């Protein structure tokens, strides 16, 4: 992987910028092994206009207003998004009610899928797509521009709950549960997939001491991250720390060894009366005889992840 070989890996980030999306963005901005080409955004943790504001404001905070941001989906491939309760987790503004200066620029005039297509087509190297929202933007891109699939190195996805309870329904994780048809399009696209689901992201937590180190690392970005997680931490009372769902996907895109994963055949359930949106994982394809189409994360080197995250925050303004 280029990021591990010393050359920055070209990355596209797809977000619905709430608290953990924001930290994933900060991680990639502070990681020298990543070359963030652009950001696409969709409705999710908060309405799309707020997602746009949050994303652009974070880029301004970090002095990276050169990175283009384009807006995409406000509804799933079929029907409308169902409420997921994420607003309370992320606060009214999606950033734990922390105030940062408004952006001074607007999103790109093109749609998200058009920005994806342009940046992937123009890149001299294959691009990694890190998607930490529902997969509607990504699925739409794959349906509209199938000829560009060969220019994608890998898809690193935050989503799914293979062997643990869901956070959207008893069996479905929110990013897949909100648009399972989109997830199935992505899973069946024939592109290498890494799935950072709840099975591994709940193990990638930040303790109170680690979050305090963000605050004390001497950067605006570190202080901002700590402030956001004051709100987020209230939802993890009694747990060893706050789960870092989206940042883990961003980190795994650059560091193969960070996450232990199992090859599996992966699908999203589309039809179950009570299981719609569930992640169906057949390890090794043993039960179905279907070929493996994903690496599904099961364990994380949490201490190495914590060190990388803190180092990234220290490199930011």
Image (cartoon, rainbow, N blue to C red):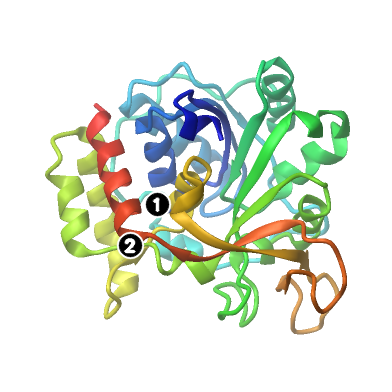
In the picture provided, is 21 more to the left or to the right than 167? left
Residue 92 vertical placement versus 310 (above, below)? below
The disc label shown at residue 232, or none: 2
Label 2: element kind: helix
Give the percent coordinates (x, y) of residue 103. 40, 26
In the picture provided, is 24 more to the left or to the right than 166? left
The disc label shown at residue 19, or none: 1
Give the percent coordinates (x, y) of residue 281. 72, 72
Q: Which residue is drawn at the image coordinates 21% and 55% (left, top)?
A: 211
Give the percent coordinates (x, y) of residue 285. 79, 70
The disc label shown at residue 279, or none: none
Q: Earlier in the sequence, mark 2 or mark 1?
A: 1
Residue 244 vertical placement versus 277 (above, below)? above
Res 295 quadrant in image: bottom right
The quarter of the picture where the C terminus appears is top left
Give the percent coordinates (x, y) of residue 165. 56, 81
Q: Which residue is drawn at the image coordinates 77% and 56% (left, top)?
A: 293
Residue 125 vertical placement versus 205 (above, below)? above
**Disc 2/disc 1 C-alpha distance (Å):** 8 Å
């Amino acid at each position: 992987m280029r990021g591990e070989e010393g050359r920055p890996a070209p990355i596209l980030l797809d977000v619905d910028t709430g608290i953990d999306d924001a930290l994933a963005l900060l991680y990639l901005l502070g990681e020298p092994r990543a070359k963030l080409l652009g950001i696409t955004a969709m409705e999710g943790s908060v309405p799309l206009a707020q997602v746009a504001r949050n994303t652009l404001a974070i880029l301004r905070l970090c002095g990276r207003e050169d990175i283009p941001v384009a807006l995409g989906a406000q509804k799933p491939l079929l029907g409308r998004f169902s409420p997921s309760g994420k607003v309370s987790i992320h606060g009214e503004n999606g950033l734990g009610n922390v105030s940062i200066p408004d952006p001074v620029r607007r999103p790109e005039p093109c749609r998200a899928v058009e920005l994806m297509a342009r940046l992937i087509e123009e890149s001299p190297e294959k691009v990694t797509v890190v998607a930490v929202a529902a997969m509607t933007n990504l699925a739409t891109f794959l349906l509209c521009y199938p000829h560009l699939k060969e220019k994608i190195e890998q898809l690193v996805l935050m989503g799914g709950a293979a062997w643990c309870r869901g956070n959207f329904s008893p069996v479905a994780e929110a990013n897949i549960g909100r648009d399972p048809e989109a997830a199935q399009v992505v899973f069946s696209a024939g592109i290498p997939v890494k799935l950072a689901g709840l099975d591994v992201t709940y193990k990638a937590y930040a303790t109170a001491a680690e979050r305090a180190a963000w605050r004390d690392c001497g950067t605006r970005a570190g202080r901002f991250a700590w402030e956001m997680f004051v709100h987020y931490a209230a939802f993890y009372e009694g747990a060893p720390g706050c789960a870092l769902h989206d940042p883990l996907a961003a980190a795994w895109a650059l560091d193969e060894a960070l996450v232990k994963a199992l090859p599996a055949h992966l699908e999203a359930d589309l039809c179950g009366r009570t299981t719609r949106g569930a992640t169906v994982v057949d390890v090794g394809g043993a039960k179905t005889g279907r070929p493996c189409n994903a690496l599904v994360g099961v364990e994380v080197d949490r201490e190495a992840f914590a060190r990388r995250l803190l180092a990234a925050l220290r490199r930011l303004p």
